[in-house]
Image (cartoon, grey):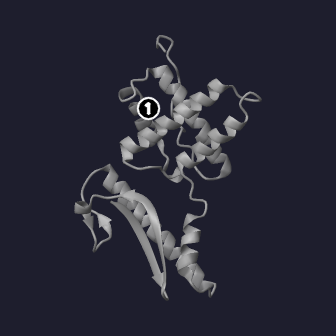
Amino acid sequence: MPIYMRSTVNGLVKELATSRKSDPELWDQKSEKAYGKGEYIKELNNHLSTLKVKIFEARAGAYRDKQTGYSKTSFSVLLKNQKTILEVFKKHNEQLAALVDSEYSPATLRRYKISFGHILSFIKWKYDLEDFEINKLNYDFLTDYVFWLKSVRKCNHNTTMKYTCNFRKIVNGCIRHGWLTRDPFWGFKMSTQNNAGE
């Protein structure tokens, strides 16, 4: 089931979709978090804790500024500049499509569309999510993505590196825009193999 957060102050109510889901049987209403073990449960609870902190900070800021109806303010602050991988990747592909035949070839667009599909499928496979926040990208995400390409998609090493290189372009754009403060590719090897087939 999808998880929502609700902020209510002075009769003002606002709900926020957290972009996360939980098995109702694993949800603890009292603590407002999921219980159990596993990477997904850990990531889920960390994400919800981060959202709570952001809302409390926005509320405190609104009170300091003597604003009213901080419930609305807190959510607008929370959602501002909250970029996701697929959102940015989709915009990149739309801009690339507009430049086909002038700066890019149809083959380049097709390659990035396939890469987009791979990232979408990987996020669903690994995290059971529809998208993934950019600021959560890390080295583990990349190594798990490479593993998925090779084990699930059955790509050989060189093809895997091509798709990873396409994704790296998206990540580099996020770094330049300031949406990602550290490079998850730092220390990541992108070498190809001479004996790998296509």
User: In this orientation, which residue lies closer to the viewer: 5 or 164?
Assistant: 5
Q: Is residue 140 visible?
A: no
Question: Is the N terminus in the top left, top right, bottom left or bottom right quadrant?
Answer: bottom left
> Callout 1: few (<14), some (14-19), or many (20+) C-alpha neighbours within 10 Å?
many
Task: Please tell me which residue is depicted at 56% across the width and 64% down the height of the picture.
Answer: 79
Quarter assignment of residue 109? top right
Question: Which percent across, then down, holds residue 118?
Answer: 47, 35
Question: Which percent across, then down, holds residue 149?
Answer: 42, 30
Q: Secondary structure at mark 1?
A: helix
Indicate left or right for 20 with 136 as reference.
left
Question: Which percent across, then down, holds residue 110?
Answer: 59, 28
Q: Is residue 132 above or below residue 66?
A: above
Number of numbered discs visible in the structure rendering: 1
User: In this orientation, which residue lies closer to the viewer: 78 or 95?
Assistant: 95
Task: Please tell me which residue is depicted at 67% across the width and 35% down the height of the picture.
Answer: 97
Q: Is residue 83 visible?
A: yes
Question: Which percent across, then down, holds residue 69?
Answer: 56, 84
Q: Residue furthest top?
A: 195
Indicate left or right for 158 with 100 as reference.
left
Task: Please tell me which residue is depicted at 54% across the width and 71% down the height of the picture.
Answer: 75
User: What residue is disc 1 on?
Assistant: 146
